[in-house]
Image (cartoon, grey):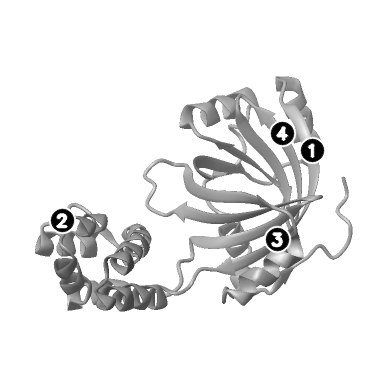
Amino acid sequence: MQKLEKEVKILNIDIPKMREKLVNIGAKFVEEINQQIYIYDMPTFGSRFKEVTDLLEIRKPIYDDVALKKLKMLLEELEDLTIEEELDSFYKTYSLNNLVDLLNLPIEKIKNIINSNNFQNIINKQCLNPNKYIRLRKNNNNCELTVKFFIKKEKQNLQKVIETEISIENFEETNQILESMGFARRSYQEKKRYQYRYLDAELDIDEWPMLEPYMEIEADDKKKIEEIIEKLDLKNYEIVSINTEELYKRKGIDSRSMNELRFKEKVNK
């Protein structure tokens, strides 16, 4: 199931005090979770683009349909990562409002444009999408497989996230399936979470190796997040809208280059 959520993080919290605050406003405690996580990178833009162009060269309707679906996802990601000035120049050249508008053109026109130097200049500046990845996660005894897409160009001061998620039965077998499909496992991670629900929002207190604890408020409505922040009286805390990778960068840690993020010893409750 795909869902669009908005989220913020409240940094450097005291876990017992924050849990007390949540109880006082009537938040419902759901569970304490020990998470094991495998992260996989999506294929590179170059390989995904080549797959599209190869399919379009076959010149059969069924392959055209598959190619255009793949191209749509590629264009949405490029739209998010490419600087506005470069996109504006491209739009002006081809009379487009956005990159996905390309799909409204005849197949031959699409092929001409995506093989042009203008489009090649856009795609050649990207390698892996740092804001989109596959996550295989075990929460105690439950497992789920998720594609997470953090939208970079979000004008509000909230992290916008698209998640496509399914429940799975077997953690290690799913890991083997993904690796056999050619997805490269980037890292193994561990996390401890205290999960709460309030006003149809999810409030999670998270502990990661080498990071100070933080609370994440995730909802489908900006006003709901603002209401919760006010009820919890969090105005004196640092509130950010960035992913965990950026929090590691703040501490001078490149989490993307680490094969493992494990707790060295049991986290104190």
- Horizontally, residue 164 falls left or right of residue 66, namely right
Q: Report how far apart the C-alphas of labels 1 and 4 lie in the structure.
A: 7 Å
Task: Kindly identify the residue that appears in the image at 63 percent across and 63 percent down.
Answer: 251
The mark that comes first in sequence, 3 or 2, is: 3
* SS category of the residue bearing label 3: strand
Quickly name the residue at label 1.
31
Amino acid type at mark 1? Glu
Above/below status of 176 relative to 214: below
* Viewer-nearest residue: 177 or 232: 177
Amino acid type, mark 4: Tyr
Q: Which amino acid type corresponds to the residue marked 2 in the rendered image? A: Leu
Is residue 237 rendered to the left or right of residue 154?
Answer: right
Residue 154 or residue 148, whichever sits in front: 148
Residue 134, position as x, y percentages in the image: 57, 62
Report the amino acid beneath label 3. Ile
Marks 3/4: CA–CA distance: 20 Å
Q: Nearer the viewer, mark 3 or mark 4?
A: 3
Mark closest to the chain's N terminus, 1 or 2: 1
- The disc at residue 196 is 4
Q: Residues within 10 Å of mark 4 (few under 14, many from 20)?
A: many
Please provide percent x and percent y for residue 37.
Answer: 70, 60
Looking at the picture, does residue 21 appear above or below residue 182?
above
Sequence-first disc among 1 and 3: 1
Q: Earlier in the sequence, mark 3 or mark 4?
A: 3
Query: So how many labels did they put on this image?
Result: 4
Q: Is residue 178 visible?
A: yes
- The disc placed on residue 37 is 3
